[in-house]
């Protein structure tokens, strides 16, 4: 069964996107929204301090199986987003989804179908679907 919510979201984007309908506008707005997500995360670290980044070299024992590697991978994040930073980042990700849906609309693609294809690929390849 098709996910109605994602289809409705994509249709709403098509209906409400007025000023930036050019593919060039959509591509640049998508890139800008990505940069705004990065900036919001960076500000959570540098301005608010609710999260910290402690990046070091990943240390994976040699004898570990590929399936166990995940247990040794560190995301380098410490702390938890405060309510304010969470709200800002959620807003920026929402804007990014808006322009992603606009891009899909311009290219006559369906986001739900793309999600299903990616899910099938990840499920079929399992840990070998390296992203």
Image: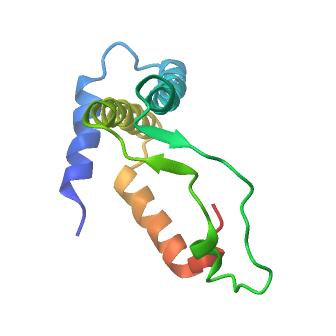
Q: What residue is shown at x 77% (from left), y 87% (from top)?
A: 63
Across and down, in percent, residue 77 comes to 52, 49
Quadrant showing the C terminus: bottom right
Q: How is the image coloured?
A: rainbow
Up/down of 87 relative to 66, above or below: above
Q: What residue is shown at x 25% (from left), y 49% (from top)?
A: 7
59 with respect to 5 (left or right): right
- Front residue of this view, candidates 33 and 115: 33
Q: How many marks?
A: 0
Q: What residue is shown at x 37% (from left), y 46% (from top)?
A: 80
63 with respect to 119 (left or right): right
Across and down, in percent, residue 60 comes to 73, 72
Up/down of 56 relative to 99, above or below: below
The single residue placed furthest to the right in the displayed view is 62
The part of the image, by quadrant, that contains residue 28 is top right
Across and down, in percent, residue 69 comes to 65, 76
73 with respect to 29 (left or right): right
Across and down, in percent, residue 85 comes to 34, 32
Up/down of 6 relative to 27, above or below: below
Q: What residue is shown at x 38% (from left), y 36% (from top)?
A: 93
The part of the image, by quadrant, that contains residue 105 is top left
76 with respect to 43 (left or right): right
The part of the image, by quadrant, that contains residue 1 is bottom left
């Amino acid at each position: 069964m098709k996910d109605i919510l994602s289809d409705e979201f994509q249709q709403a984007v098509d209906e409400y996107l007025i000023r930036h309908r050019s593919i060039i506008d959509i591509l640049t707005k998508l890139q800008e929204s990505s940069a705004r997500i990065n900036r919001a995360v960076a500000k959570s670290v540098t301005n608010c301090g609710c999260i910290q980044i402690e990046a070091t070299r990943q240390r994976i024992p040699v004898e570990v199986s590929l399936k166990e590697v995940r247990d040794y991978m560190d995301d380098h994040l410490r702390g938890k987003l405060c309510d304010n930073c969470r709200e800002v980042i959620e807003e920026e990700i929402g804007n990014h989804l808006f322009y992603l849906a606009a891009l899909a609309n311009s290219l006559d693609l369906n986001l739900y179908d793309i999600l299903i294809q990616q899910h099938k690929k990840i499920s079929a390849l399992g840990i070998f679907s390296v992203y």
